[in-house]
Every structure is written in structure tokens, then in C-alpha cells.
């Protein structure tokens, strides 16, 4: 696709996203949820309520820095104003409908929203260091039906709002009591975001972007863009925009090196073939040797895991600051693929590494609770013998 074709295509994608818009942030009782508003929108609410400008800054701090959900805990705000605010507004959180802990400490939440739609969010603690990543969903379901992905079997119900996207992270922090202490220590456990949960983030670009701007705001949660990775199945026209506006790390779900195979595994390839995808990666702003593009490659036995594939992969990404994450296929109920053998994965990794690219083999995390890559779906567990919910 030429660059000139990209702008109208982008408009078409944004118009389609609007058809799956999330419900309003006003509760049935008329109160508005302040979570998810941009700084400008929050200021507008404060001014409409007849309050002074600096109150917006105070609210922002309490909501996003301290993680407070109750106006009565905002000690810099006098009681009468706390009461007035609580009559007009709420500071919402998704509801924890299910909370499961894997034997490897990975924790999966099923978060339910006000309209009863739900998504899964996963916290993946680092096995060595005292930190971890929160894997966030961007849509309820997905319109793309990648053949190896459980989410892909769930029809798109709707897009998530900025409040629901940032709310997954905030609710996960609540669960670990990971907000700064009054002494000001910074939270470490939940310090990275990967947009790798349910849905295609670039098909819900505007809401994802607003949520990430909130997360990156230095006076609130304050995560740097280097701590955020957005994974896309290859929505080429939106990649440039995400790079320019957000500058977050990019992960691309490649999974095949030939169009005929990728057409089958990642059907979006029929629209944006490999050549265009790689060109978009080459243009991606901010990609450098210090900030590489991650190519995700699911290892499917006998499908995409040959040595010829590995060599073709290296050829394809030549010249790009890249690394390749090899993800052993995670099975799910009804899936029709098998995971490549450890030997085939090792061999594949070696070829990529010898060509000068880092090629880590991702250890599956949380498989016992269907929390690993591609296993998420908005549903209760299939296996009743699942560990009891925490807390
Ligand atoms: N929709 C986005 C982000 C979510 S998926 C995307 O497709 O990139 C996160 C990663 O898990 C993607 O690379 C996806 O292709 C991969 N994945 C999906 N199903 C999988 C499975 N069953 N086993 C291993 N990885 C899978
Ligand atoms: Fe959607 Fe990503 Fe799953 Fe494909 S891999 S169906 S784009 S969530």
C-alpha cells in the first residue's frame, strides 16, 4: 500500500471503530465517572461544576497518583466540596468477577463493566525481579479471527473506553495494594503494560491512545512510554499514527513469513500483506537499536516452524532494529494446532540468533488458568478444579 492510500484507510478504520463505541460514562443515577477523562475533559467538568481550575489538578493527583476511589479520602479537599463532588461524580473501577492465581503466580482477572460486558486482564510477575507486567485488553472479543487464538473465536461485542482500559491497570494495582504510600515510595510490581490481551488495540485506536496518554502522564501513574508495548496483528494504516502520537514500544504479530500462510493464520494479512507490514515497521518512529521492534512468532508444529522459515524470517527483517519473540503455541479448548517440539523451537531460535537477532523463547505463563498468550476469552473457567479466587 502506498503512503497516500493510508489516510483514507485510516479514516475508514476510525469510522468502523465508532460503530462499536463503549457505553456512556454517566451512571443511571446521573453521576459521571471521572476515570478515563483526559486532563482537558476533567478540567471542563470541574469548571461546569463551578469550581476553580486548580481542583482538576488535585483530582488528577488523587485519582491517578494515589489511586483513591473515595472523595472523602482526598485530604487536600474540604469536606463540603468532597460531598459536592461525590454527588456529581464517581471514581470507577471495573468489578472483579473472577480472580485466579496460577501455580507460577500469574494472576488472571475477569473484569466486568457496567453493561455486564467483561474482559480478562493478566498480571505476570517477573520470576526473578520484584516487578511485573500487566497484560491489558482493548476490546471485548476481536473482529480478526487468527486461527490459533482463543480470543479470535469470540465475536467483537464492543470497544473498551479509556476508563475501562486504564481501569484494568488501576484495578490490578488495587488488588496488589500497589499505590504510592503516603511517604511517596513508587510502586514497582505493576510497572509495565503490555497491550496484548483481548482485541486488536489499533482497531480501537482513539480509546487506547487516550488511556495510554493518561497512564503516561507524569503527574499521575507516570509510566514512561518505554514501559508500554502495543501489540498489533498488523493494522498498517494505524501503526504510523501510534508511533507518532504515543511512541510506545511496538510488537508485531508476524507468525508467518509467506503471504499464503499468513493469509491463513492471520487473515488480516489479505488486506495488509507482509511487504506493507514490514514497510510500516521500517517507518515506525522511535525504533532504534535501543528500542527494537518485537516480532512475535507463534510456534506451530509442522506449520511455520521449519529451518527454511527461520531463514526466511531473518531475510525479511534484515536491516530492522528488531528482536523475535518465539511463543510456543498455547492450546485452548477446541484449538486445532500443536506446539512445535522443543528441538524445532531451539533450532529456529539458533538460526535467528546466529543472524544477529535476539530470539528469546517465551516461557508460557499461567497456562493452568488459561492466562497465557492467546488463551483469553470473556468467560468463566471451563475447568472447575481451578484454584480458589484470592481475597
Ligand atoms: N491482537 C493483538 C494483541 C493480542 S494477542 C495481536 O494480535 O497482536 C498477543 C499475542 O499472542 C499475539 O502475538 C498473538 O498472535 C499471540 N497469540 C494468540 N494466540 C496464541 C496462542 N494460542 N498461543 C500463543 N500465542 C498466541
Ligand atoms: Fe485478535 Fe490478536 Fe487474537 Fe488475532 S491474535 S484474533 S488480532 S486478539
Image: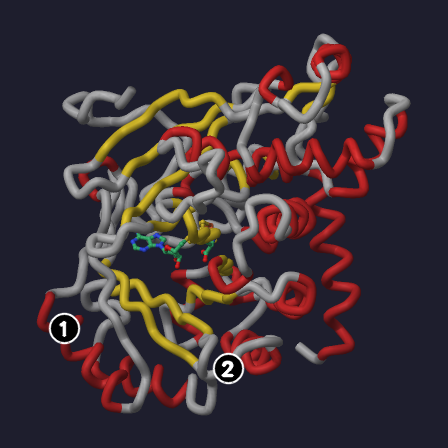
Residue underneath mark 1: 344
Q: Quadrant of ligand 1?
A: bottom left
Residues 55 and 200: in front is 55
For residue 12, above or below residue 355: above
Residues 210 and 332: in front is 210
Residues 187 and 303: in front is 187
Residue underneath mark 2: 288
Q: Is residue 216 left or right of residue 131?
A: right
For residue 325, above or below residue 103: below
Q: Is residue 342 left or right of residue 384?
A: left
For discs 1 and 2, the disc positioned in front in the rendered view? 2
Q: Quadrant of the C terminus?
A: top left
Which image quadrant is residue 101 in?
top left
Residue at the image point whose x is 64% and y is 39% from the top? 162
Give the farthest residue toward the front.
183
Does label 1 or label 2 sit earlier along the sequence?
Answer: 2
Which image quadrant is residue 42 in?
top right
Which image quadrant is residue 266 in?
bottom left
Amino acid at each position: 500500500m502506498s503512503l497516500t492510500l493510508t489516510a483514507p484507510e485510516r479514516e475508514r478504520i476510525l469510522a468502523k471503530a465508532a460503530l462499536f463505541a463503549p457505553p456512556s460514562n454517566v451512571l443511571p443515577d446521573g453521576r459521571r465517572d471521572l476515570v478515563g477523562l483526559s486532563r482537558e475533559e476533567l478540567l471542563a467538568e470541574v469548571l461546569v461544576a463551578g469550581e476553580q481550575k486548580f481542583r482538576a489538578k488535585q483530582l488528577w493527583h488523587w485519582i491517578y497518583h494515589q489511586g483513591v476511589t473515595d472523595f472523602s479520602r482526598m485530604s487536600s479537599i474540604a469536606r463540603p466540596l468532597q460531598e459536592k463532588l461525590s454527588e456529581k461524580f464517581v471514581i470507577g473501577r471495573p468489578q472483579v468477577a473472577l480472580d485466579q492465581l496460577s501455580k507460577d503466580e500469574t494472576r488472571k482477572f475477569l473484569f466486568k463493566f457496567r453493561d455486564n460486558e467483561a474482559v480478562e486482564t493478566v498480571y505476570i510477575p517477573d520470576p526473578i525481579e520484584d516487578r511485573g507486567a500487566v497484560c491489558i485488553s482493548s476490546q471485548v472479543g476481536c473482529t480478526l479471527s487468527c486461527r490459533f487464538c482463543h480470543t479470535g473465536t469470540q465475536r467483537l461485542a464492543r470497544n473498551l473506553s479509556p476508563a475501562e482500559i486504564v481501569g484494568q491497570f488501576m484495578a490490578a494495582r488495587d488488588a496488589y495494594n500497589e499505590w504510592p504510600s503516603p511517604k511517596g515510595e513508587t510502586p514497582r510490581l505493576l510497572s509495565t503494560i503490555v497491550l496484548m490481551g483481548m482485541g486488536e488495540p489499533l482497531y480501537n485506536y482513539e480509546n487506547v491512545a487516550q488511556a495510554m496518554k493518561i497512564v503516561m502522564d507524569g503527574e499521575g501513574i507516570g509510566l514512561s512510554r518505554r514501559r508500554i508495548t502495543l501489540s498489533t496483528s498488523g493494522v498498517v494504516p494505524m501503526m504510523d499514527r501510534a508511533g507518532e502520537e504515543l511512541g510506545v514500544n511496538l510488537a508485531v504479530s508476524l507468525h508467518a513469513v509467506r503471504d499464503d500462510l499468513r493469509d491463513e493464520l492471520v487473515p488480516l494479512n489479505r488486506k495488509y500483506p507482509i511487504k506493507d507490514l514490514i514497510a510500516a515497521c521500517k517507518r515506525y518512529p522511535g525504533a532504534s537499536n535501543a528500542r527494537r521492534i518485537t516480532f512475535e512468532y507463534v510456534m506451530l508444529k509442522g506449520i511455520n516452524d521449519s529451518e527454511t522459515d527461520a531463514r526466511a524470517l531473518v531475510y525479511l527483517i534484515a536491516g530492522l532494529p528488531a528482536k523475535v519473540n518465539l511463543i510456543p503455541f498455547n492450546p485452548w479448548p477446541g484449538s486445532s494446532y500443536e506446539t512445535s517440539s522443543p528441538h524445532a523451537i531451539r533450532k529456529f531460535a539458533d538460526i535467528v540468533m546466529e543472524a544477529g537477532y535476539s530470539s528469546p523463547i517465551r516461557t508460557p505463563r499461567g497456562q493452568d488458568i488459561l492466562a497465557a498468550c492467546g488463551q483469553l476469552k470473556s468467560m468463566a473457567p471451563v475447568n472447575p478444579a481451578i484454584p480458589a479466587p484470592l481475597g
